[in-house]
Amino acid sequence: MPTATRRTHYWVTFAVLAVSVASYTLMQSLTIPVLSEIETEMDTNQNTVTWVLTAYLLSASVFTPIVGRLGDAYGKQRMLVLSLVALSLGSLLAALAPSIGVLIGARVIQGIGGGVLPLAFGIIRDEFPHHKVGSAVSVVSSLLAVGFGAGIVLAGPISSGLGYHWLFWLPFIVTAVMAVAAVLLVPESPVRTPGRIALVPAFLLSAWLVALLLALSQAPEWGWGSPKVIALLVVAVIVGAVWIRVELTVDVPLIDMKMMRLPGVWTTNLVALLLGVGMYASFGFIPQFNQTPTANGYGFGASITESGMLLLPSAVMTFLTGLVAAPIAQRIGAKSVVVAGSAIGGVGMFMLAFLHAEKWQVAAANGVVGTGIGLAFACLAGLIVAAVTPEQTGVASGMNANIRTIGGSIGTAVMASIVTAHFLPSGFPKEIGYTAGFVVLGGALVAAAFAGLAIPGLSPKELEDRLEMDPAAASRADGSGDLVRTGH
């Protein structure tokens, strides 16, 4: 039996993980406000430039659960370094990209970095003192929403002050430093899930995810009834069914279907899907609303920077509530926090739908949305981590992150279809499109609150006990190896 070795202090590990997760989530949204500038600079068209977002989305969706599973099998620290290197190299290539094709390829490479999310949760569970796991997972979870909103806020000042290329240069510098820090400061996990990675399930997972997300992302442009969209959705359903069947029969599944059927897993994933619908789509369309010239009867004619500042209350409140979510959950339970947070987010979205004549109204509504989303997001990852064994932490949290992304794709596609259904003579969408769209997103968040009621009820003490489970002891109990969790 191996002897305990000296480990990096857990707060040092946490700092590396937090900056890594924040960098990844920022990359999801930094380019959204400047797509029109990239379109002009690279002499392309709107259809092509949207692939700067779509390519990143597809790549991250494919690699997030796969990298999470690889981390469970071959070492979380090792795969964290690989994910950060992919983020760094992709950012460097994007900053130097001479054409839109190269930029899109760079975004695919960046998407591999989606693995930082499940790996961070797994490393926290392995390395932190038992009583600190819940709060650390809560803060890192809140960074998912904070980073997405902050990216939209920061894009304008960075682009106008330094040029849009610095939206890639800055992430390159940060992720390169974090890759080195991960090598030097993040200890390797003592918890492993033995067995090789089955290639067929990985291919099938990639195939149905690409088909589904490509259909959803292109449906507003191609039309929901177009042959291409219908064909892609059919392919996604058929290949998805085959994937599930294969996962049930292979010796070492990529995604354990028995795990996915656990009440604590599927209910939390359903909430994540609905939260993704409400949150990601709103961040994509609120800036468009703000930038609409006032001559159209709505909007503020805001610049990219001004539009982003109206989203600042959401990012700030998401971060602040992420800090306090864990103590609140210890008092009333994580399930109750998720339900309340989803409901609060829904109220904020309804405010946005009907109270948006003044800038302060939009800012206030965004603050309410951020409060709710911050509370709900902060507790989701903890519920997933507590519902599975330590050996399944990476793949379970990876799929949860993936399902949020799928929800975001659904919400964005539905929102785009609603907003662009009717246009004014000026060429801008009618106000009723935004109103109806925000009502739908608010409905999704309210639905998330109701779905949260189905999450198995765990008392604060029971949730803490599950998060505090000793990974090595759990591994030995499951018969997966004689592992020792070293001390700090």
Image (cartoon, rainbow, N blue to C red):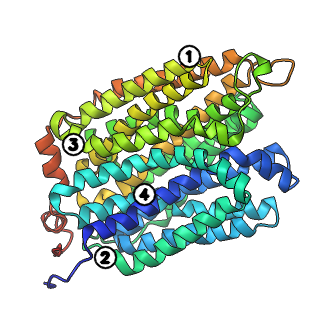
**Alpha carbons under labels 1 and 4: distance apart:** 35 Å
**Alpha carbons under labels 2 and 3: distance apart:** 27 Å
Amino acid bearing label 4 = Leu
Q: Viewed as shown, does residue 95 lie left or right of 240?
A: right
Secondary structure at numbered mark 3: helix
Camera-nearest label, 4 or 3: 3
Q: Give 118 or 24, whichever is nearer the viewer.
A: 24
**Does label 1 or label 2 sit earlier along the sequence?**
2
Q: Which residue is mark 3?
A: 327
**Does label 1 or label 4 sit earlier along the sequence?**
4
Quarter holding the N terminus is bottom left
**Alpha carbons under labels 4 and 3: distance apart:** 22 Å
In the rendered image, residue 280, in percent from the top left (x then y), is placed at 54, 38
Quarter holding the C terminus is bottom left
Q: Give 264 or 20, whichever is nearer the viewer.
A: 20
**Does label 3 or label 1 sit earlier along the sequence?**
3
Amino acid bearing label 3 = Pro
In the rendered image, residue 158, in percent from the top left (x then y), is placed at 66, 55
Q: Tell me the crowding category of disc 3: few under 14, some 14 to 19, or many 20 or more residues within 10 angstroms, Cα based.
A: some
Camera-nearest label, 2 or 3: 3
Camera-nearest label, 1 or 2: 1
**Does label 2 or label 3 sit earlier along the sequence?**
2
**Alpha carbons under labels 3 and 1: distance apart:** 32 Å
Q: Which residue is mark 1?
A: 355
